[in-house]
Image (spheres, grey):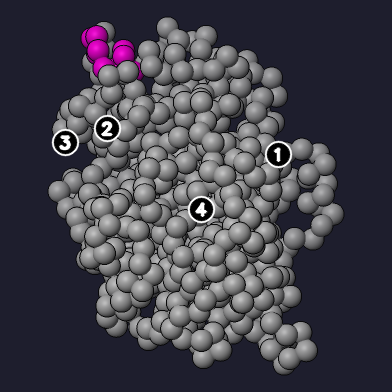
């Protein structure tokens, strides 16, 4: 029998969300220290718990511009262990390349954290369990999910700060597509595209909502993301306890409007906060780190101000 | 070397007769089918191979009433793994009825992009800025009611080459459309990825797995320039391949076209000790098959099509 997803609270009954922006100029910085100090401020319930880090490991990335950077993944793992987590696993399931080992080797993850054999889980081929959805945003009524994702006590979505040629942006919510097992749905997980990318993002996150999000915005990607865009140094880590609020803040940092990103607008009705007054900002302010990202012509409506000179700039 | 891989494979068989993707995982159709293909490849004629027999029992028991197989237990519909299950049954005439039932399901399974209305819509709406794929072709999808993609199309084309499929109606037309689709989806300059050769004007990056499966599926047109370009691409990147799955597949693909490279085999052997992750059942299986001197499992494409 498929398992039922947890009941959802409407956002109006949620406490304010907390999102921290930290400046990190490059991957040679002491990311572990920055992350550990920031995570401590959140006082997260991870002591003695099993944590699953879900980075975005989509394709071979020898230049380090597509996937969540290994230095950030390793720093997050170290930080959660220091915070008392009993185990910290790293897991993802690429939607376009089924050779996970080739992806890991291309980004040299094992040089940053080891032993990979004991801590990395290929979510594409892990054992699965069927989960019936309570939401009906898409036509999907249920999906299989990896058991490790369903059994972890604390799930952290760790995307890279990127634009996306179908969804506008790909951040902590869209990143959860990687939790849908390719061994059940293929490469790409085309069933999600036919169900509608934006509503499918909502259904998946309503079913397996990440407890925390850490966006690697030290170097992002703009334009024709998620794999064919251009490198965009942004020099920030954005993290928080509400993936909707983290993504909204990230989108504002990218110089875009979160209310115009379909899946974010939908998620704000059910999963978290998008309004700035409901998001308690820690660390840097958005205006101090804002760094407009180029978007494809199809997404020019995401730009912040149609009357500003930026409206026609930074569009491909 | 193949003996070591086979011993390893036998050791990973679950009590129910199937194999999971990795040690200790639940049995699934995809790794089970590959394990059975490898065990049969190295079995002695006439000898009873107990793991092979148990594996076949698991596989045949998992077949759905409509002839298909699902990727995970309890899945409400069959999917692309049906091709792999059929491939594993090709060598076992005692299951010819089950094989035919699977092949029939495959022949009847239509991707969503093969429908008349969808194709008309694609022709009317100019999507050339986004991608330049032809709506005239179609192949097979990963899961029902979705679009054609390279890998499931290759698997279906390979297994539908079998003599057992010869009686299926309308098969030549379907194979023809799939043939066209694969060449249409080839990346500029050769090689294949999942099926997006160009998005927003940017050429897609080929990948080893899809390229090898496409080269196997298109072996009957081995002399075409596209095949040669794809082999050239595969050869050009072979020194950069590091994972056991891709090393094994590259060795298989190049070998089928007579372009074997002993260095690949050596690197495949040595990668077992230096691997960052434990080898998956598929990696072990493909590695074993890569060392097969006379690859009978590929006879289905190297003999004349049905």
Whether discs 1 and 2 lie on one chain: the answer is yes
Q: Which residue is mark 1?
A: B112
User: Disc 3 or disc 4, which is closer to the eye?
Assistant: 4
Q: Which residue is mark 4?
A: A209
Q: Would residue A142 appear left or right of B241 to someone viewing this image?
A: right
Measure the alpha-carbon separation of dots 1 and 3: 43 Å
User: Disc 2 or disc 4, which is closer to the eye?
Assistant: 4
SS of the residue at dot 3? loop
Q: Main secondary structure of the magenta part?
A: helix
Q: Is residue B90 above or below residue A156?
A: above
For this rendering, which residue is in front, A19 or B284? A19
SS of the residue at dot 4? loop
Measure the alpha-carbon separation of dots 3 and 4: 46 Å
- Residue at 47% across / 56% down in the picture? A210
Q: Is mark 1 in CB contact (under 8 Å) with mark 2?
A: no
Magenta-tinted stretch = B47-55
Q: Position of residue B283 (x, y in %)?
A: 30, 40
Q: Position of residue A190 (x, y in %)?
A: 60, 46
Q: Residues within 10 Å of mark 1 (few under 14, many from 20)?
A: many
Whether discs 1 and 4 lie on one chain: the answer is no
Whether discs 3 and 2 lie on one chain: the answer is yes
Res. A190 in view: no
- Residue at 74% across / 75% down in the picture? A301
Between discs 1 and 3, the one toward the N terminus: 3
User: Disc 3 or disc 2, which is closer to the eye?
Assistant: 2
Q: How many marks?
A: 4
Between discs 1 and 2, the one toward the N terminus: 2
Between discs 3 and 2, the one toward the N terminus: 3
- Residue at 45% across / 35% down in the picture? A129
Marking on residue B24:
2
């Amino acid at each position: 029998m498929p398992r039922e997803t947890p009941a959802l609270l409407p956002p109006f009954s949620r406490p304010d969300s907390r999102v921290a922006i930290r400046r990190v100029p490059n991957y040679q910085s002491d990311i572990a220290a920055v992350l550990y100090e920031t995570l401590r401020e959140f006082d997260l319930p991870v002591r003695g718990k099993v944590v699953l880090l879900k980075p975005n490991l989509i394709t071979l990335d020898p230049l380090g511009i597509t996937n969540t950077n290994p230095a950030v993944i390793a720093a997050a793992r170290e930080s959660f262990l220091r915070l008392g987590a009993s185990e910290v696993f790293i897991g993802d399931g690429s939607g376009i390349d089924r050779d996970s080992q080739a992806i890991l080797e291309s980004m040299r993850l094992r040089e940053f954290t080891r032993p990979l054999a004991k801590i990395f889980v290929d979510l594409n081929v892990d054992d699965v369990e069927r989960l019936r959805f309570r939401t009906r945003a898409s036509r999907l009524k249920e999906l299989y999910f990896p058991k490790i994702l369903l059994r972890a006590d604390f799930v952290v979505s760790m995307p890279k700060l990127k634009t996306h040629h179908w969804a506008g942006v790909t951040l902590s919510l869209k990143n959860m597509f990687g939790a849908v097992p390719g061994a059940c749905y293929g490469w790409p997980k085309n069933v999600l595209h036919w169900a509608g990318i934006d509503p499918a993002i909502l259904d998946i996150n309503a079913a397996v909502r990440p407890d925390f999000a850490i966006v690697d915005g030290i170097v992002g990607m703009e334009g024709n993301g998620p794999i064919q865009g251009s490198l965009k140094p942004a020099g920030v880590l954005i993290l928080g306890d509400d993936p909707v609020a983290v993504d909204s803040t990230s989108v504002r940092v990218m110089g875009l409007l979160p209310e115009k990103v379909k899946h974010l607008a939908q998620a704000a009705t059910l999963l978290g906060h998008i309004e700035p007054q409901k998001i308690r900002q820690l660390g840097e302010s958005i205006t101090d780190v804002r760094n407009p990202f180029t978007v494809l012509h199809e997404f020019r409506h995401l730009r912040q101000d149609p009357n500003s000179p930026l409206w026609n700039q930074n569009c491909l | 070397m193949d003996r070591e891989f086979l011993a390893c494979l036998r050791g990973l068989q679950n009590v129910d007769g199937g194999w999971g993707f990795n040690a200790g995982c639940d049995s699934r159709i995809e790794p089970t089918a590959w394990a059975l293909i490898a065990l049969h490849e190295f079995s002695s004629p006439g000898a009873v191979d107990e793991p092979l027999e148990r594996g076949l029992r698991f596989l045949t028991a998992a077949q759905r009433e409509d002839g298909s197989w699902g990727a995970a237990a309890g899945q409400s519909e069959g999917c692309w793994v049906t091709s792999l299950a059929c491939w594993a049954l090709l060598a076992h005439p005692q299951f010819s009825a089950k094989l035919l039932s699977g092949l029939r399901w495959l022949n009847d399974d239509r991707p969503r992009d093969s429908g008349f209305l969808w194709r008309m819509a694609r022709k009317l709406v100019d999507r050339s800025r986004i991608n330049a794929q032809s709506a005239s072709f179609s192949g097979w999808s990963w899961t029902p009611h979705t679009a054609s993609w390279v890998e499931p199309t290759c698997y279906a084309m390979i297994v539908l080459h079998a003599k057992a499929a010869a009686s299926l109606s309308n098969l030549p037309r379907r194979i023809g459309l799939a043939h066209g689709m694969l060449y249409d989806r080839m990346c500029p300059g050769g090689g294949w990825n999942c099926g997006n050769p160009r998005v927003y004007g940017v050429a897609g990056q080929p990948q080893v797995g899809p390229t090898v499966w496409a080269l196997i599926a298109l072996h009957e047109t081995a002399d075409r320039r596209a095949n040669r370009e794809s082999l050239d691409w595969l050869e050009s990147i072979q020194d950069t391949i590091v994972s056991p799955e891709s090393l094994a597949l590259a060795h298989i693909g190049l070998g089928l076209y007579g372009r074997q490279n002993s260095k690949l085999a050596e690197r495949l052997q040595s990668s077992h000790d230096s691997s960052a992750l434990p080898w998956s059942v598929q990696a072990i299986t493909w590695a074993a098959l890569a060392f097969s001197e006379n690859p009978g499992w590929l006879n289905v494409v190297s003999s004349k099509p049905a």
